[in-house]
Amino acid sequence: MTNTHPQVTTLRFEHHREPFGIGETHPRLSWTVATDTPGWRQAAYEVRVRDADGSVVGEWACGSGGSVLVPWPARPLRSRERLLVAVRVRGESDGEPGPWSDDTPVEAGLLLPGDWSARFVSPAVDDRQPPLLRGGFEVRGPVVSARLYATALGVYELELNGVRVGDHVLSPGWTHYPKRLRYQTYDVTSLVRDGDNVLGALLADGWYRGRLGFDGGRADIYGDRLALLAQLELAYADGTTQTYGTGPHWRASTGPVTASGLYEGETHDARRERRGWSAPGCDDRDWLPVDVLDGEDLARLVSPDGPPVRRIETVSPVAVLTSPAGRTLLDFGQNLVGRLRIRVSGEAGRAVTLRHAEILEDGELGVRPLRGAAATDTYVLRGEGVEEWEPRFTFHGFRYAEVDGWPEGLALDVVAVVCHTDMRRTGWFTASDPLLERLHENVVWSMRGNFLDVPTDCPQRDERLGWTGDLQVFAPTASFLHDCAGLVRSWLKDLALQQSPEGYPPLWVPGFELTFPERPFAAWGDAAVIVPWVLYGRFGDAGVLRDQYASMKAWVDGIAELTGERQLWDEGLQLGDWLDPSAPPDRPFEARTDGHLVATAYRVHSADLLARTATVLGEHEDAARYGELADAVRAAFGKEYVTPGGRLVSDSQTAYALALRFALLPEPEQRERAGRRLAELVRDGGFRIGTGFVGTPLICDALCEAGAYDTAYRMLLERVCPSWLYPVTMGATTIWERWDSMLPDGSVNPGDMTSFNHYALGAVADHLHRSVAGLAPAAPGYRALLVRPRPGGRLAHASAAHETPYGRAEVAWSREGGELTVRVVVPPNTTARVELPGASEGVEVGSGRHWFRTPFRPVDEDVWEETPARY
């Protein structure tokens, strides 16, 4: 049965996966359309808004083809208000609009500081042990709606009448707490009951009070007291309401969690559990009073921009091993992030200890790369039948776990619980080479592990910080693989709040003082400009450009002030092409590429993007000014670093990749010579990678731009270290921090900065999507697609699929017998330009399914000869 009438199938509000308790008064709307009409384009839409009781608030019609982040048509949402929204659309060739979509609810949270009557409460006696807090209230009749709004200084879990509230992990998450503290909204209607009720909370240090950072780190960064803020609002069947919140009547005690830290792990003594502590009838005479913290600024409370961290899936061990020292080890077959869940029975007081690590060294748990992170959880049994336990307030990066203290003769019952921000998966890639597919899967797992509330560098050692440079290079890949817009927008808000008076962002966000020098670093600070531009390009969100515009300008203007009229950023320490494989293990910034060349190149790139941003926003004077700045710095770059013939002072892969991809070479002859030299360097290096954080996302695209497709493929598919596939051949299941985090003999890199789960070098996946498979945006938010597959190497087929803001787009190609077959799926309300290899012109197509066939020559076999032994 065909569907010729356009049907709105998915309605979204801003970037919320769940539009519940949102903070926007004018949430923008996005929708996708299902229709079998080829080439369908929207001509108009209608929005209908109802009250929660079904009464129509209004209907609005708009003669527009827009369906992504369109303006909210109704009056502003008020605090606590719940509305039902439906949309229907009409195509350019449709006689009548399609049917209304299902009503989709959207509900606001508490939008004003004055909406809060609850107060922050903290245990009056604090022995640094994670506390319990509880308070009772009475429900006087039938309840039709109950909303609980909560946050904490620290991390929290809530229970209402003995039942866990929600499924969030490590709420309220990590933000720049002095200016932005998230609260969460829960529907607890089913948990309240007539008569006596009890609301309880467990608190722990989390990011607020726990130790953060390397070289010993720091504790109490944001404060030295844990506190809870919770407000329960009841709506009765008789139309009355009641509000109950934290205040002086609450009580505090300690519970079974005796210690908890993100790096340290968690200790739980089940003998100390207080039965029924969060339910009516609990004897709380030995509980202590709380202190009310009246000095807390409620104006900093904000609703989340994206989804929470959740338990996403469980993974069972693939093997149980015995180490040379006789220890029991579990191999989960996948490097992941989360914690373990155990089911165990035994005598009271028995301690089961769980240690975590990513690798094995000499057959034992490889904890050395964890540095100061103990990553150890301990459960002390209460001795009553089968006991199930999972830590609450910590997480670990691990593939292997060591189990000590398990009762003899009892079968191991342990699973790994994968935790990360509950982002919707939106991107996929396949290819005929299993190693290439595994590389892509490793990128996905590294993103999952490091997008745990903030985009971190690594999830396992004493660091786990939101390094700006890592996200800067990985943002395009991240935006393809998952709908991460809400998470990243929140992170960008914190970046802007923490820029120095000179416009310099911190090296990691949320930022705090540590031992690292406080100065601007190119490629890292440039995240202030590049990441918002990526969100605009991939999600079609011009609003993020407007929100971040002052921050973007502050960075570019600050560096312009720093460099002066010479325009060259040629002074001061730079991180440069961090972790270039030739850099000394203990000095990863000493790359083959001059760090100041990198810095000046990024100056051009950010000024260019800022000029384009100003154009999008209608800031035409700024557009001209920043365009002129980009030209001036480009000219200075050419005089300082480029010969008239197109050779660069730093004769390196990264230098040429930057020059080509950032348009630093004005003359065609220079670009042609630079492209040839880049290919020569790659060939002379045995097709092995010679780039670090900066060059890695650019190198394959730069080679393709120079016409050296086969060279790019030869490098992409190289298996000898350093290369992308070398870790795969060594059994990697995530992306490594170093090209040689594990050496060819199976030993671990001896450096003290060796992670086996860093996404930055996985930024090459964006090239797999756009160039190998051939699926790229040609207009912001994929309103137009560029289908430009460039088969190469010895791949027989490849494909990519992406859930764009308009619907699912796909490109799949295969080659056989000198012919290339390409299948394209274009979502409704978009178009695609298809450019096939060897074709002199592209083809414009509308939505629907399309097939193309074209002759295709074999690869350049000379490039694929065996690599000479001297390499």
Image: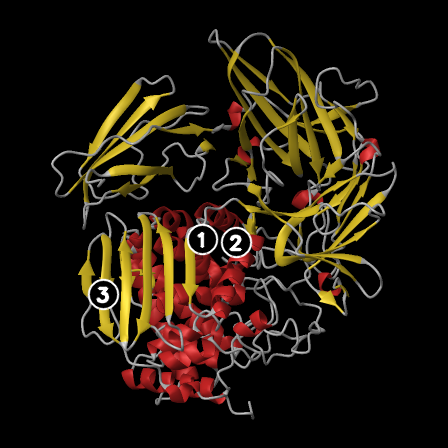
Q: Amino acid at mark 1?
A: Ser
Q: Earlier in the sequence, mark 1 or mark 3?
A: 1
- Circle 3: element type: strand
Q: Nearer the viewer, residue 202 or 544?
A: 202
Q: Which residue is mark 2?
A: 499
Q: Which residue is mark 3?
A: 852
Q: Which residue is mark 1?
A: 551
Q: Amino acid at mark 3?
A: Phe
Residue mark closest to the camera, 2 vs 3: 3
| Percent x, y of residue 681 | 46, 86
Q: Which mark is residue 42?
A: none
Q: Amino acid at mark 2?
A: Gln
| Percent x, y of residue 44 | 19, 38
Q: Earlier in the sequence, mark 2 or mark 3?
A: 2
- Circle 2: element type: loop
Is 840 located above or below residue 611 in the figure? below
Q: Are marks 2 and 3 in contact (CB under 8 Å)?
A: no
Q: Nearer the viewer, residue 705 or 179?
A: 705
